[in-house]
Amino acid sequence: MKIHEYQAQALLKEFGIPVPDGCVAATPQEALEAARKLGCPVVLKAQVHAGGRGKAGGVRVVETEAAVLSTAEAILGLTIKGLPVRKVYVARAAAVRSEAYLSLLIDRAISKLVFIGCAVGGVEIEETAKTSRGRIHRLELPSRQDGTQAAKDYAAFAQELYKEPRLAGEAAGIMAGMARLFRARDCSLVEINPLAVTGENRLLALDAKILLDDNALFRHPDNAALRDPDSEDPVETEAREAGLSFIGLGGTIGCIVNGAGLAMGTLDTVKHFGGEPANFLDVGGSSSPQKMATAFRIILRNPQVKVMFINVFGGITRCDDVARGLLEAMQECRLAVPVVVRLAGTNEQAGRDLLAGQKLLVASTLEDGAQKAVELAHKP
Amino acid sequence: MSILINAQTRVIVQGITGRDGSFHTAQMLEYGTKVTGGVTPGKGGQRVHGLPVFNTVAEAVSATGATVSVLYVPAPFAKAALLEAAAAPLELVVCITEGIPTLDALEARTALRLAGIRFIGPNCPGLISPGQCKVGIMPAAIHKPGSVGVISRSGTLTYEIVAALSAAGFGQSTCVGVGGDPIIGSRFADLLPLFEADPGTEALVMVGEIGGQDELVAAEYWRTRMRKKLVAFVAGLTAPPGRRMGHAGALVGAADETAAAKIEKLRSYGIPVARLISEVPQVLRGS
C-alpha cells in the first residue's frame, strides 16, 4: 500500500529520524498559514501516488510568503500521471551541501532485508548508479536479529557513505530507526532520497517513500488509516473492498478469471486471437455470489465492453458456487452484452448443469472461449 | 517415482477443523493420501473425518509418525503454526494459506531452514505425485501418473497446463506449486536438483509469470547443472508494467522482468517457451 510523502515523513519522525518541519494543506489558504508558521523559504510538494512530481511542476521552492498562494494554487490544480493533486505538503526549505540515497527493502531473490546506500542521491539516482561516482553499497541484514552486531554493521555501512565520523554516526542512527520502523509497522519499503547534509552539517531526510505490506493491515489499523482513497482509481478501490483484484486495460473484452496467473494467461490468449482485453480481474480463491455480482457490475459499467468472458478453473473454488454467483449477478444486473463462460475443474458438471438454459455461450476450453469472445467483440 | 511425496508419505493437517482444512482433508483422503491426523490448538481429542485432532504439532507427530505437515491455518495465525512445525521432527512443511504478512513469512522461512525442514509456499496450491499422494488443494481429476515434473508459481494456471498435459498423454511425476508471494520457502532453482535426481522424471515444465527473476535463476541452474529436458510457459505478456518499488527495485538488482524479456532470455538459454497454454504439450514433444 502506498502512502503520501507527508505521512512517510511523520513515520520517520516518530522513529527518531530527522525530517524538515512541515504541514500538509488542502487549500492555498491552508498552505499560506503553514508557510507563515514555518517561515519562508518553504518547499511546496504535490502529494500524489506518482513518480516524476518535480518534472511535472509539482515541487516548487517559494522564497516569500507573497508567492505561496499562487504557487499552491498552481500545484493544487495539477494532474500528475492522471492523478489530480488534492494535497500539498509545505516543508521548511533547507540549505543542502550534498545528497545521498538510503533505503531498506526486502530482496526477494535472497529472502532478506537489505539496506541500499549511495553517497550520491537525488532524482537521477538510477543514472548516477551506473557511473563510478554512484557506487551502490549493500548491507544484508542477518535472518536472526542481534542488536550489538546490527549496530556495528550499520556503523561500518554508514562509513562507506560519509567520511566525516559525526555524519557517519548520524547515518548509523538513522539506519537503526529505519530498521525499527520497517519491523514495527510491517513496511515493504522505506526509502530516503535524498538524505541531505544541511548547511549546519546535519543529516536531514528531505524526501521519503514508504510502502506498507497489504497483508499486514489486519494487525495495523494505524496503517490502514493512512490509505487515501482519493488517490486511487475509484473502480480499483471498489474492487479491492469486494476482495477482487482489478486493473483497467482499455479494450473491449471484459474478463473475469480466478487466480492471477490464469487471469494473465487468459488475457494473453485473448490478445493472441486478436482481441483486446478491457481489464484484468481476479476473483480470487472463493467466488461468493456477492463477489461475482460486484465483478459483473464493475465490468458492465464500462461502455467500451462488447462481450464478457468468464474463465474459471476450479480448485479451492467450486464451479457450482461460481455458477450460482453468475445466476445471481445476472438477475441483479441487466445484461446488455453477450457472455462467454468456460468452467473447468472442481464440480465442473454441477456448474454447467446450473447454467443450462441460460442465455450464455458455453465454451469447452480456454482457447475456444477466447476465440468466441474475440469473434463477438469484432461484430459490428 | 516422484519427488518430496509418495505413496508412503504420512501427513498431518494444521488447521484441520477449519472450513478449508476440513474440506481438503476429505479430498486428500479420497485421493489416497495417508493423512494421519490434524492439529488445532484447543481442539485436541476431537475427530475430523475419523482422524484424531491434537493440540500441538509435537503431539501429532509423535502419535502418528507423520513427516509432512500441510497448513490451512488463517493468515493471522500462520506464523505461530509454522514456527511450531519448525520445532517438530518433520521433513516437509507445505503452507496453503494466502495473505501472510511478508515479515512473518520471512521469520517462518528462517526457522524452518535452520531446522533443516523443506518449506513449500505460502500462498500455493501444494504438491501432488499423481496416483500416489496429494498434499494441497488442486483438483485431483486433471492429473495422470507419468514422467513429467511440473513447477509453477501460480495455482489455477498450473491446473490449466496440467490438464493440457494429461489430455495430450503426458502424465506427471510430481507437480509443485511454489507460491506467488515475495517470500517463499522453495524457489524453482531449489527444486530442480530433486527432479534431476529423480529416476521417475524425464522432462520438466516450468510455469512462470511476470515479475521477479526466479525463472532466470532456474534457467542458469538448468544450463550448467542439468541434463533433463526443460520447457517453459510465461504468463503476463499483456500485463501492464508492474508497480515499481520506487528506485529501490532497480538498485537492488532484482528489477521485475517483463514476460517478453523473460521469454527472450529463456530462449537464449536454449529453453523452448510455449506461446499458448495449449502449445505446452507440443513444445514438450519437440515438434
Image: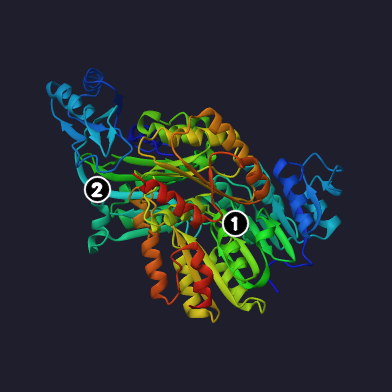
Q: What is the quadrant of residue B41 in the picture?
A: top right
Relative to the observer, which residue lies in front, A196 or B62? B62
Callout 2 environment at 10 Å: few (<14), some (14 to 19), or many (20+)?
A: some
Relative to the observer, which residue lies in front, B94 or A303? A303
Q: Which residue is drawn at 53% across and 52% down?
A: B181
Picture layout, residue A236 above or below residue B157 = above
Q: To which residue does mark 1 refer?
A: B110
Q: To which residue does mark 2 refer?
A: A123
Q: Where is residue A155 in the image (x, y as percent from the top left)?
A: 40, 53
What amino acid type is highlighted by mark number 2? Val
Relative to the observer, which residue lies in front, A261 or A153? A261
Q: What is the quadrant of residue B212 in the picture?
A: bottom left
Relative to the observer, which residue lies in front, B19 or B237? B237
Picture layout, residue A88 above or below residue B112 = above
Q: Position of residue A366 (x, y in %)?
A: 51, 55
- Which chain does tag 1 point to? B
